[in-house]
Image: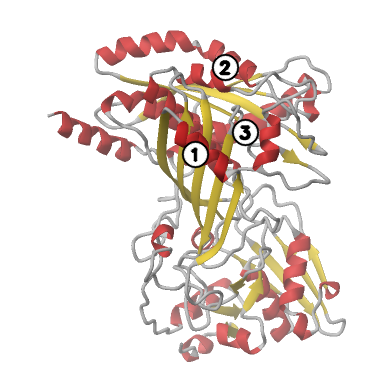
Amino acid sequence: MRMSEALRIAGVVAAITGVDLEERGLAWMPTLTGDRQMVLATDTVMFDGQEVVAILAEDRYSAADAAAAVEIDYEPLPPVVDAQAALQPGAAIVRPDRDPTSNRIWHWENGDAAAAARSFDSAAVKVQQDFIMPRVHGAAIETIGCVASWDSEAKHLTLWASTHTPQVTESVLGTAASHLGITPQNITIHDPDIGGAAGSKVLTSPGYVLAAYGSLITGRPVKWIEDRIAYLKSEGYGGDYRISAEAAATPDGQIQAIRVKTITDRGYANAGVDPTAMPEDLYPVAPTPYALKAMHIAVDAVYTNKPPAGIAYRRTLRVTDSVFATERLVDTLAHTIGVDPATLRLQNFVGPASADGSTPDHARALERAMARIGYWDLRREQAERRARGELIGIGVGSAMEILRAGPSRVLNIQAMRSLQGATRHKTPDATYPFGSQVCVVDIDRETGRITVRRFVGVHGSGDVKQQRALVTEVYGPMAGGFAPAMLEAVTYDDQGTNVTSSFLDYLLATAVETPRWEFEQAYEGIDGGGDKHNPGEVPTVVGQVALVNAVVDALWHLGVRNVEIPMTPARIWRMLQANRALSS
């Protein structure tokens, strides 16, 4: 790396490299999950867009000119981009400092593997599906930024940061710089009102450390604001799962067991937000609403040459992926055995509902949604239009969630099963959001365009006195489910280059694309029910899978069994063209 030309530019005060930080013991900073991530790249750049040098200048323009003048020689290395391939023998090792022999970060299992195996061994009907849940971005209106000021006399650092977790930032900075005499007691974090960020401002950004170090070495306040492209390329991600799921059932559609294997792509550093006993809360927070006999989950986390994931919950944290797998399996089973998807759900829901809300009234929510949208009339219309070659699909999704606020304990699969049987599991300070959504879509055979005709959601949402607040808690999250189903995905080419680093390619939903939502409460007029039936994250997670179920429902008779998200017109068009080629 050659810095001489950059340092000659007027207005440039200093430049910081990874080697500089390494000499001060600041090249890496800790994560919440016991790993560590780079502040600046040292000898190896881990992902496309990773910062390799920080320029301190009097103004933004001088800094940009200096950054362009830095000369860096790169030696290409084999990239690890696909998480599944990363586990294969012979794959390049991303983090030899953690494990020189494997890219696996951890393996986690929960549930009763033996009981699930017995159910599958004796099952008359088995269905299986593989799903890819793409990487998504928090995409906050404001990017990440901070102002750091080091007081050399008081030996105190003050940081104004766009963070949602000042305590985490304080701890990370103090830990990273403790050998310099800077501990959390020497740090004051100011977190002004910054609005929402869908989780992308939960963890500490490397930019915070750089600004603090820049103030330390110059004795001057340092301001850092990440631009949009850097934000979309380097931090704030969620999702990135490969899920293989299967269900066992009786011939009449009684679901016996579900098994799920998941590979989660964590990028080059394990920097998730949940350092608990369950390293991936994919399923414990979203117990199935169905009366299963057994369930088994296995999750492997993997290093790849991407930025850290497991942070943002654009589609909600963890819950989306578990509900998606379960609800897609239920639809696949229904179509396979020739039972209507809504009917199959009503047949399998756990019940009866309990007075305290720990077992919600799933049937009530789904039946109300079906009545409002005119479900059976739509099914008759579908049959008539399908005979004319038109494509109409009706999608259903149902879910529940356990939200813990306050003292909690680990919830495992066995505990979830108690929600479905006679013995109830009492979780202290917990709420049990639930709901069902039904949507109808029309698909243009010539273009692959999906048009959402109607979208109805019915959610357990408590006291009707909260109606105005509930509208914002339901409509916004429903849009949050629509966006990744139809538009959003962070994608990389085979060399690990991020090809969605601007809003020209990473598509957010606007009022133009978003359909009109229709919402009802499952419990109307129940005073005080809000504690047990707030909507939680369910509107987002159910909305996404209901859309996918609707599209697959429209295409099932053409041989389509699954559609990857986002369901772009190009993706649907290619499937229709392939079907035409097969038909001819």
- The image position of residue 556, as x and y in percent, is 33, 26
In the image shown, does 71 or 330 lie closer to the viewer?
330
* Disc 1 from disc 3: Cα separation: 15 Å
Residue type for callout 1: Ala
* Disc 1 from disc 2: Cα separation: 21 Å
Q: Nearer the viewer, mark 1 or mark 3?
A: 3
How many numbered marks does the figure carry? 3
* Quarter of the picture holding the C terminus: top left
Which element carries disc 2, helix, strand or loop? helix
Which element carries disc 1, helix, strand or loop? helix
Residue drawn at the location 46% of the way across and 87% of the way down: 1
Mark 3 or mark 2: name the one nearer the start of the chain: 2
Give the color scheme: rainbow, by chain, secondary structure or one colour: secondary structure
Residue annotated with mark 1? 483
Q: Nearer the viewer, mark 1 or mark 2?
A: 2
Residue drawn at the location 21% of the way across and 35% of the way down: 577
As drawn, the label of residue 369 is 2
- The image position of residue 107, as x and y in percent, is 56, 58
Residue type for callout 3: Val
Q: Is residue 89 left or right of residue 225?
A: left
Residue drawn at the location 56% of the way across and 83% of the way down: 18
Q: Is residue 225 left or right of residue 489?
A: right
